[in-house]
Image: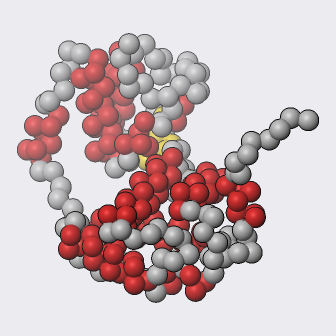
């Protein structure tokens, strides 16, 4: 019979101490990995998981800078207020949006620990913590002159120039995210109905976006330069939107 590894896995440690709320055996790093593992099980987007990892790692760093022990059982609302919010605001000079971004990650983390009964309801500091109020600013838009200047930048004598112009036009016309653009498959483009199916969405809800005649013509020009036939049965359904140059 083969010998097992001497180190307990995160699951085994949590099981051993499920009935011992005050145990220090489960440190912050193990709790973090357990939380991220749950995010993967729930099929969170890779960008979301990386966001949680980054923000929670910064949280750990902030408390250690102040020589505060990072123990998931002993993080109080006062620590969040004084050593996270005020520290970021006064010492780090962080903007309100940055602080709220970090608080959202922390709230999800501690809510997970409570849901899994790692900490009790009383030990969850975010029952008393609210996001900071922030004034919503108007998003500046491009002027027609700025758009003309922007569209003149790509070198249309090169493949990358044609590619960049096509993507810029598509982003401007449809308002899709860059990550959504990269996830477009050739089979998602319906030239007959003048629309594109967006599948790689943030909220996991597919949607159609309309494209106009000029956008369709630009896409056809682009595909001809990368030798992709544009007939419905002429390309592989799993082919992604070509963005690289060989």
Q: Position of residue 206 (x, y in %)?
A: 54, 50
Q: Position of residue 11 (x, y in %)?
A: 71, 56
Looking at the image, which residue is at 32% across and 64% down? 65
Looking at the image, which residue is at 37% across and 32% down? 216
Q: Quadrant of the N terminus?
A: top right
Relative to 122, 90 lies left or right: left
Residue nearest the viewer, comparing 170 with 79:
79
| Quadrant hosting residue 149 | top left
| Above or below, comparing residue 124 to residue 209 in the picture | below
Q: Position of residue 185 (x, y in %)?
A: 51, 32
Q: Is residue 201 visible?
A: no
The total of numbered circles placed on residues is: 0
Farthest residue in the left direction? 145
Residue nearest the viewer, comparing 23 with 196:
23
| Quadrant hosting residue 166 | top left
Color scheme of the displayed model: secondary structure
Q: Is residue 57 visible?
A: yes
| Quadrant hosting residue 31 | bottom right
Relative to 97, 226 lies left or right: right
Looking at the image, which residue is at 59% across and 27% down? 237
| Above or below, comparing residue 126 to residue 183 in the picture | below
Looking at the image, which residue is at 15% across and 51% down? 142
Q: Quadrant of the C terminus?
A: top left
Residue nearest the viewer, comparing 170 with 72:
72
Q: Position of residue 175 (x, y in %)?
A: 34, 49
Farthest residue in the right direction? 1
Residue nearest the viewer, comparing 194 with 75:
75
| Above or below, comparing residue 95 to residue 132 in the picture | above
| Above or below, comparing residue 73 to residue 159 in the picture | below
């Amino acid at each position: 019979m083969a010998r097992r590894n001497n180190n307990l896995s995160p699951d085994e440690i949590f099981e051993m101490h499920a009935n011992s709320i005050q145990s220090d055996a489960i440190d912050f790093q193990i709790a973090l990995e357990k939380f991220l593992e749950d995010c993967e099980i729930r099929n969170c987007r890779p960008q979301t998981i990386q966001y949680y990892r980054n923000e929670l790692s910064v949280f750990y760093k902030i408390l250690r800078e102040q020589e505060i022990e990072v123990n998931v059982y002993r993080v109080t609302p006062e620590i969040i207020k004084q050593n996270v919010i005020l520290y970021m605001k006064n010492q780090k000079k962080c903007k309100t949006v940055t602080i709220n971004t970090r608080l959202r990650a922390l709230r999800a983390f501690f809510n997970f620990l409570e849901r899994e009964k790692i900490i009790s309801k009383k030990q969850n500091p975010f029952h008393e913590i609210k996001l900071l109020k922030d004034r919503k600013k108007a998003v500046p838009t491009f002027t027609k002159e700025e758009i003309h200047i922007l569209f003149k930048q790509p070198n249309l004598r090169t493949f990358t120039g044609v590619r960049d112009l096509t993507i810029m036009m598509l982003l401007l016309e449809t308002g899709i995210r860059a990550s959504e653009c990269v996830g477009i498959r050739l089979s998602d483009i319906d030239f007959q109905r003048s629309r594109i199916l967006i599948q790689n969405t943030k909220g996991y809800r597919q949607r159609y976006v309309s494209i106009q005649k000029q956008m369709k013509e630009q896409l056809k020009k682009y595909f001809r330069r990368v030798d992709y036939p544009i007939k419905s049965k002429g390309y592989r359904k799993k082919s992604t939107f070509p963005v690289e140059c060989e």
